Amino acid sequence: MKLAIGISTMNEGILNLSARIKAIQKDHKIIVCHQVTDGNSYDYSDFFESNTVVIVKNEKGLSKSRNALLTQAGIERADYLIISDDDVEYSIQGIRELMSYINLNEDVKEHYQFKSICENGLDRKKYHNYQKTLKSLDLFKVSSIEMCLNVSLLESENILFDEGFGLGAKYPVGEEAILMADIVNKRQRIVFLPIAITIHPLESTGNQLFSKPLMIESRGAMFKRCFGFSKGSFFAMLFWLKKFLLRRKSNSDISSYQAFALILKGLRESD
């Protein structure tokens, strides 16, 4: 089985990337999508290994970058694509464990979620310690740097990231959950494997949910895109209850009422 690692980066983010991928560069295909929006010229000589491809795009939009990686993975005839970013490092042992599992189960067609750890080796969030098939509510817990996607399965149903969601798009969050929902809605399986592969600092971006109106509105749009208006509204209300009534942060700039209105706006005004 052929594994590719697809890395999204923008502008100067590419400058430190070659050092992060050298350990895996010769064993697996590396696909880099470099979005250049600052008008500068960049030297790609560090990426001239035979196993590395650099795609240059003069546009922004994280989902657009992810889709360029998926398209190139198909061109390269990769069986699986790990989604990644320019600030991520990798566990060589974890990649070996993943490939061993895939090769032992090569007749099984499915996608995978794996673990991401902090620089100190601890899990970045709470994971199961056993293999499990993801269900509807699990989809919203998967981040892009935990995905190993079966390229041929995606191509068979023309599944791509929704370019209306993600950084640089109208709605800046939700692209991972939407892709996961599209996969499950096409009756394809996503299986969690308790294998640590990506290494990334623990982030606090989740706190933005409580201070930025567009982040809240985007959740309403995301639930509608995943499940349709009726079922999406149900999940959106559960989300509001959990985040803004039961566990609301005292330092939030946005009231529960305002959050409710923003989620409704996302539900009503999104396509």
Image (spheres, rainbow, N blue to C red):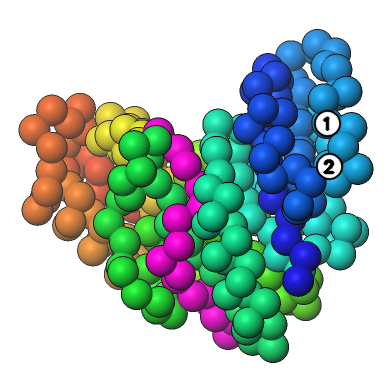
In the picture, residue 156 is in which quadrant?
bottom right
Residue found at x 9% / y 53%: 246
Q: Is residue 101 positioned above or below 42 on the image?
A: below
- Give residue 229's position: percent from left, percent from top: 44, 68
Tag 2: amino acid: Thr
In the picture, residue 108 is in which quadrant?
bottom right
Q: Is residue 194 magenta?
A: yes
Which quadrant of the rendered structure holds the C terminus?
bottom right
Taking the image as shown, residue 55 lies to the left or right of residue 123, namely right
Residue 164: image tag: none
Magenta residues span: 184-201
Q: Report whether residue 211 is seen.
A: yes
State yes or no: discs 2 and 1 in contact (Cβ < 8 Å). Answer: yes
Residue found at x 83% / y 42%: 52
Taking depth in this image into account, of 23 and 45 the one nearest to the observer is: 23
Q: Which residue is mark 2?
A: 52
Q: Secondary structure at mark 1?
A: helix
Residue 47: image tag: 1
Taking depth in this image into account, of 97 and 89 the one nearest to the observer is: 97
- Give residue 29's position: percent from left, percent from top: 79, 51
Q: Secondary structure at mark 2?
A: strand
| Mark 1 burial class by Cα count in 10 Å: few <14, some 14-19, many 20+ | some
Taking depth in this image into account, of 225 and 150 the one nearest to the observer is: 150
Mark closer to the chain start, 2 or 1: 1
- Give residue 160's position: percent from left, percent from top: 69, 60
Q: Is residue 23 magenta?
A: no
Q: Is residue 50 positioned above or below 20 on the image?
A: below
